[in-house]
Image (tube, rainbow, N blue to C red):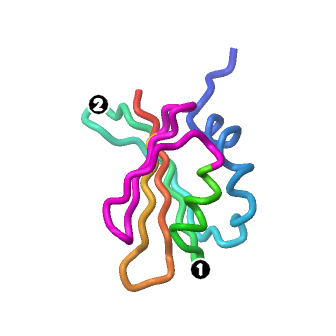
Amino acid sequence: SPVITFKDVFDVMYEQKLETISSKKVNEEYYVSGRASQNNNLEITYDFVTIDDVKEILSKQNIGWNEISKNRIVGHDYDTNVYIELFKERGSNKVILILQKRN
């Protein structure tokens, strides 16, 4: 049977929701992190959207949010157990969304 990747999970769970701002996407990168490469990350950079725009779209999920500062919020999607980080890039109109699945 095919291996289900984090990208597959993302495509099913988030891509459709983020479709409304997909035209503002300027970069998308998958990478692993953590001591044993146990975290799968998807980092998406958007231009000319606000943190609140992205948060509002994602809040249709069952997410607990925690505001770190006015330019950075983190969240946890309880349904998919995905951790979310959302921050504004300093000195630009870019907003970066990181979705992380910890194994």
- Depth check, front residue: 6 or 99: 99
Residue 102 falls in image quadrant: top left
Mark 1–mark 2 distance (CA, rounded to whole Å): 35 Å
Which residue occupies 46% across, 44% down? Answer: 64
In the depicted structure, whether residue 47 falls above or below residue 41: below
Amino acid type at mark 2: Ala
Which residue occupies 51% across, 49% down? Answer: 42
In the depicted structure, whether residue 94 falls above or below residue 30: below
Q: Nearer the viewer, mark 1 or mark 2?
A: 1
Q: Quadrant of the N terminus?
A: top right
- Depth check, front residue: 35 or 45: 45
Q: Residue 70: image x %, image y %?
A: 37, 71
Q: Are marks 1 and 2 in contact (CB under 8 Å)?
A: no
Which residue occupies 59% across, 74% down? Answer: 49
Q: Quadrant of the C terminus?
A: top left
Circle 2 residue: 36
Mark 1 secondary-structure assignment: loop
Amino acid type at mark 1: Phe
Inspect the magenta stretch and tell me whether residue 80 lies in it: yes
Judged by its main secondary structure, the magenta piece is strand
Q: Is residue 103 left or right of residue 53?
A: left
Which residue occupies 50% across, 82% down? Answer: 93
Q: Residue 25: image x %, image y %?
A: 63, 68
Circle 1 residue: 48
Q: Is residue 101 left or right of residue 57?
A: left
Q: Which residue range is magenta in the image?
A: 60-82
Q: Residue furthest left?
A: 35
Q: Residue 39: image x %, image y %?
A: 39, 36
Inspect the magenta stretch and tell me whether residue 13 lies in it: no
- State which tag comes first along the sequence, 1 or 2: 2
Are there few (<14), some (14-19), or many (20+) residues within 10 Å of tag 1?
A: few
Mark 2 secondary-structure assignment: loop
